[in-house]
Image (cartoon, rainbow, N blue to C red):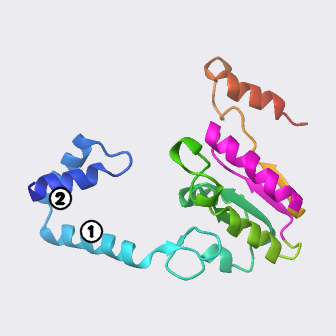
């Protein structure tokens, strides 16, 4: 296999990058000065060598603990439980949540061989227990899929006995949508999750 084919194949393995996009990226890199490719390669190498999951919450960091876990201004009474580190980034971007996070590293999926032991559920329970009652609420922010729902139900079952209030992200109709285009399950969630004005 040629170097061109190998780089194209590796780029094509990235999420959202198909064979055509991978080919375009390779050709773009070949048109750029070599230093540009060297900088990209060095940055990717640094990423692989220096970035790792936070020892406490599981989001990505270069230090032992991430900036969220070490921030004294964060609300330590609430933890938002997410499937992956990208979800942390998405929630942080809103600027609305000031609590802590816990990254599960996926969601329950028995068909894919992912059970509770493959996720960071035990470390979540350890955090709850180590907080000595300071951690009062766990917001379950798993994806609204069958696997995400199953994961949320499982987490509720293991967290409630620990004396933690368990809540779920609200779901409903996206801003700017027309009701006629909203799927039935989303509409049903919006109706059941309605609140006082």
Disc nearer the start of the sequence (2/1): 2
Q: Which of the 4 image quarters holds residue 77?
A: bottom right
| Residue at (57, 67) in percent of width and height | 59
Residue 173 image point, x, y percent: 69, 31
Q: Residue 29, labelled with which disc?
A: 2
96 part of magenta stretch: no
Would you call the spot at circle 1 few (<14 residues within 10 Å), some (14-19), or many (20 or more)? few
| Residue at (72, 34) in percent of width and height | 172
Residue 1 image point, x, y percent: 10, 54
Q: Which of the 4 image quarters holds residue 83?
A: bottom right
Q: Secondary structure at mark 2?
A: helix
> Compared to 71, does 187 lie above or below?
above
| Residue at (34, 52) in percent of width and height | 14
Residue 162 image point, x, y percent: 86, 63
| Residue at (60, 50) in percent of width and height | 107
According to the picture, the residue beneath numbered tag 1 turns out to be 40
Magenta range is 135-161
């Amino acid at each position: 296999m040629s170097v061109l084919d190998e780089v194209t194949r590796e780029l094509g393995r990235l999420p959202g990058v198909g064979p055509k996009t991978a080919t375009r990226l390779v050709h773009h890199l070949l048109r750029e000065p070599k230093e540009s490719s060297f900088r990209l390669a060095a940055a990717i190498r640094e990423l692989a060598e220096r970035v790792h999951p936070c020892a406490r919450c599981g989001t990505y960091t270069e230090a032992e603990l991430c900036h969220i876990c070490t921030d004294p201004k964060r609300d330590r009474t609430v933890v938002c439980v997410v499937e992956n580190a990208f979800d942390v980034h998405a929630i942080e971007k809103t600027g609305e949540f000031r609590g802590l996070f816990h990254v599960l590293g996926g969601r329950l999926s028995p068909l894919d061989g992912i059970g509770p032991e493959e996720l960071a559920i035990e470390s979540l329970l350890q955090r709850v227990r180590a907080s000595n009652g300071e951690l009062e609420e766990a917001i379950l922010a798993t994806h609204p899929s069958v696997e995400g729902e199953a994961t949320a139900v499982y987490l509720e079952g293991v967290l409630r006995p620990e004396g933690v209030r368990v809540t779920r992200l609200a779901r409903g109709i996206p801003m700017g949508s027309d009701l006629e285009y909203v799927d039935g399950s989303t509409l049903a969630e919006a109706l059941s999750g309605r609140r006082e004005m």
